Image (cartoon, grey):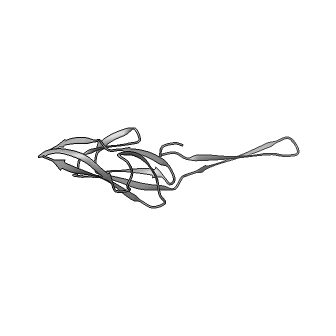
Amino acid sequence: DHEYPSHLQLRLTARLPGGDTLVCLRDLDPKTVELTFLTTPRGLPLVVGTTAEPAPFARTVMVGSVSSVVAPRTAEVPGGTATFARWSDGGDRSHTVTAPRTDARYRASYAIDP
């Protein structure tokens, strides 16, 4: 499994009766989708793969690829502490998502405790 951008290379080798060899190479580019990551309230950090950044942000990934997503348990926000409540896809605070065939959005929602 490789992160995007990535591609496969198809190599076809034919050996001719006279001993010569023919080689044909073709790059196969994967189908990709855009995954958008959001938080409510806006701007809280999320970790997707090995990179953390404040939401919202988007990642282009290969269809069928698996990404780990982690929302912090708590985060300080104006007016109190945001405590993780749920992911829009029903996953645990830390879970994996498999990229579907179409663009998708994943939202981590938080409750604000004053």
Q: Position of residue 6 (x, y in %)?
A: 52, 45
Horizontal side of residue 42 vs 61, given as left or right: left
Compare residues 70 and 55 and report the one nearer the observer.
Answer: 70
Quarter of the image containing the N terminus?
Answer: top right
Q: What is the tally of numbered marks visible in this picture?
A: 0
Q: Position of residue 71 (x, y in %)?
A: 32, 44
Q: Position of residue 63 (x, y in %)?
A: 50, 54
Horizontal side of residue 61 vs 71, given as left or right: right
- Residue located at (82% from left, 42% from top): 20
Compare residues 12 and 32 and report the one nearer the observer.
Answer: 32
Q: Position of residue 30 (x, y in %)?
A: 54, 52
- Residue located at (14% from left, 44% from top): 80
- Residue located at (48% from left, 47% from top): 66
Compare residues 1 and 23 and report the one nearer the observer.
Answer: 1
Is residue 78 visible in this depiction of the protein? no
Horizontal side of residue 25 vs 97, given as left or right: right
